[in-house]
Image (spheres, grey):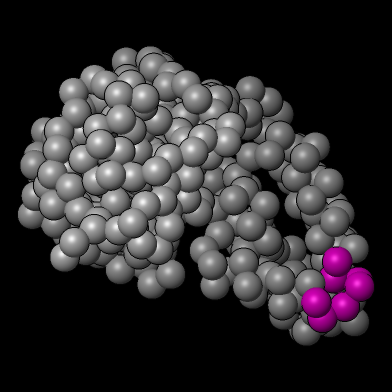
């Protein structure tokens, strides 16, 4: 893409931000570009409106914008190479519409989004026969040609996948900075926006885990293993054993073995969808206990009696305090 104008930003970078697929560094770069001038903000707003009109699809998956710009730029005389980004947006829009209607069909550009609500687990069968269980407040998004041309989807939140085997079309999940590629297996992906890590836990089969920035550096995870990606650094850490509580939101089976109350609260929040606030005195208290398909009231009663805690519920928030624990 022509860079004669210092205010211009790469089109593929802007579209990645609009598609929600940009990394932290990419978002920072675009934010810095927006701060450079009011003109940049207006140009981005124009692209954003165009993005809405074209169905919020990922331009980079259907058209190489930088390549098209290079072809167009080669045809422009030196005196006219001061084209602004808004002009290019109009050209790109025309290319998208023509190619979309002539070759792929308007349906090819649309996506389906499935969301679970704040307190409900949804079980979904995908067009390829794969099954997905979505934890509360989670979503998946995939193209209408999913299962016939590709098996790519975007996960926000947490999902358990039982993937139908298809060696011709690998199943690929985009979850924040993480990318999970698989042919057929059962695994869990936890990728909530507020969590500093993305966690992938495999029950059976095998998956390849890699980051958005390093697609060639894959880490193989097999049944009984898990791995985590630290979002800020895009570093993959492989764990030899599964944490059974990675699946507690789906199985309702919870195991604590000398876990601190702070660790316990984090698991309970993800399983029962309550918020926990702990006093400083009790957060490091430890407990060893197992729960099998128990409701939140039963779990809290056991914790309260075992650790001599004081509890108060305010809506969906549970306040826990007490005298503390003997070390």
Residue 233 against residue 299 in the figure, above or below: below
Foreground pick, 281 / 111: 281
Residue 253 against residue 4 in the figure, above or below: above
Residue 286 as seen in the image, left or right of residue 111: left
Residue 325 against residue 224 in the figure, above or below: below
Residue 232 visible, this orientation: yes
Residue 6 as seen in the image, left or right of residue 46: left
Which residue occupies 80% across, 37% down?
53
Residue 33 against residue 45 in the figure, above or below: below
Residue 43 as seen in the image, left or right of residue 145: right
Quadrant for the C terminus, please: bottom left
Which residue occupies 85% across, 56% down?
45
Residue 321 as seen in the image, left or right of residue 183: right
- x and y percentages locating residue 151 in the rendered image: 38, 32
Foreground pick, 166 / 298: 298
Quadrant position of residue 196:
bottom left
In this picture, which residue range is highlighted in magenta? Answer: 35-41
- x and y percentages locating residue 252 in the rendered image: 26, 25
Indicate yes or no whether the magenta region holds residue 95: no
Residue 207 visible, this orientation: no
Quadrant for the N terminus, please: bottom right
Foreground pick, 158 / 253: 253
């Amino acid at each position: 893409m022509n860079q004669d104008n210092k205010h211009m930003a790469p089109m593929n970078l802007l579209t990645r931000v609009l598609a929600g697929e940009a990394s932290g560094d990419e978002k920072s770069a675009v934010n810095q570009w927006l701060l450079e001038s009011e003109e940049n903000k207006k140009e981005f707003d124009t692209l954003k409106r165009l993005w809405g009109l074209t169905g919020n699809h990922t331009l980079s998956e259907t058209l190489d914008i930088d390549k098209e710009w290079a072809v167009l730029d080669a045809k422009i005389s030196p005196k006219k190479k001061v084209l602004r980004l808004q002009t290019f947006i109009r050209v790109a829009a025309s290319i998208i519409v023509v190619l979309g209607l002539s070759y792929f069909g308007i349906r090819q550009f649309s996506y389906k989004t499935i969301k679970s609500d704040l307190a409900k687990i949804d079980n979904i069968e995908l067009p390829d026969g794969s099954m997905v269980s979505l934890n509360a407040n989670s979503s998946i998004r995939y193209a209408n040609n999913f299962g016939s041309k590709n098996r790519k989807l975007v996960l926000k939140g947490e999902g358990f996948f039982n993937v139908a085997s298809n060696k011709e079309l690998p199943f690929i999940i985009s979850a924040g900075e993480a990318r999970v590629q698989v042919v057929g297996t059962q695994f869990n992906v936890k990728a909530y926006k507020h969590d500093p890590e993305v966690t992938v836990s495999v029950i059976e089969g095998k998956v390849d885990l890699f980051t958005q920035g390093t697609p060639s550096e894959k880490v193989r995870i097999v049944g009984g293993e898990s791995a985590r990606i630290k979002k800020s650094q895009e570093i993959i850490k492989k764990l030899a054993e599964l944490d059974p509580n990675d699946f507690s939101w789906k199985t309702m089976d919870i195991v604590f073995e000398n876990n601190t109350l702070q660790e316990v609260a984090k698991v309970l929040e993800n399983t029962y969808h309550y918020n926990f606030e702990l006093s400083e005195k009790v957060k490091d208290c430890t407990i060893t206990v197992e729960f099998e398909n128990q409701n939140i009231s039963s779990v809290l009663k056991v914790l309260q009696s075992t650790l001599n805690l004081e509890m108060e519920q305010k809506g969906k928030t549970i306040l826990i305090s007490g005298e503390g624990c003997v070390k």
